[in-house]
Image: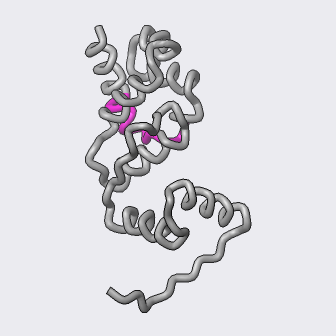
Amino acid sequence: MAKTEHIMLRVDAATKQRLEQASRRAGKTLTDFLLEAADCAATGLAFILPDNWNLNSPAVFALRVAAIRVGGSQGYEQLGYDFASAVGRGDIGKCLSRGAHEEVWNSLCGAYPAHLEGLIPKRRRRQFIQGVLRYYRDQS
């Protein structure tokens, strides 16, 4: 299919530099990189992160949340499970000993603010915590 249409974007210098660096890391042209990202968002398709991406990174965690919000195949419970798997038993084990879901949530936000604050909608927190708890039950 011939490309005959144009889309022009105006961004600040820092955004342009960040997008160019990301496209190079992905091994794609800037145009291909932006079009693929826009197409995923426009069609509501979730993208799959490579296995070597770790949810310990707040940026990767935010990408997973974004994928879920646009209709990704995995839900918040699975995200909670994967998050618990990535961060391990350290701080998160202390959070789980707090008891009620809201207390567990507040403890997790205290331990992992860059991951959780503002990303998980309030109505989905229970599902996320259920995934975290399921991970620890599976490990016992």
In this rendered view, identify the residue nearer to me: 100 or 48: 48
**121 magenta-colored:** yes
**124 magenta-colored:** yes
Q: Is residue 43 left or right of residue 106?
A: left
Query: Residue 44 in the image: x percent, y percent?
Result: 32, 61
- Position of 50 relative to 20 (above/below): above
Extreme residue toward the bottom, this view: 4
Extreme residue toward the front, this view: 27
- Position of 84 relative to 136 (above/below): below
Over which residues does the magenta segment extend?
117-128
The quarter of the picture where the N terminus appears is: bottom left
In this rendered view, identify the residue nearer to me: 125 or 86: 86
The image's colouring method is one colour
Q: Is residue 55 left or right of residue 23?
A: left
What is the count of numbered marks? 0
- Position of 19 relative to 55 (above/below): below
Query: Residue 47 in the image: x percent, y percent?
Result: 36, 53
Residue at the image position 62 percent from the left and 63 percent from the top: 20
Query: Residue 115 in the image: x percent, y percent?
Result: 53, 35
Residue at the image position 38 percent from the left and 50 percent from the top: 67
Q: Is residue 93 left or right of residue 110?
A: left
Residue at the image position 51 percent from the left and 83 percent from the top: 7
The answer to which image quadrant residue 38 occupies is bottom left
In this rendered view, identify the residue nearer to me: 42 or 86: 86
The quarter of the picture where the C terminus appears is: top left
Query: Residue 54 in the image: x percent, y percent?
Result: 46, 34
- Position of 73 relative to 99 (above/below): below
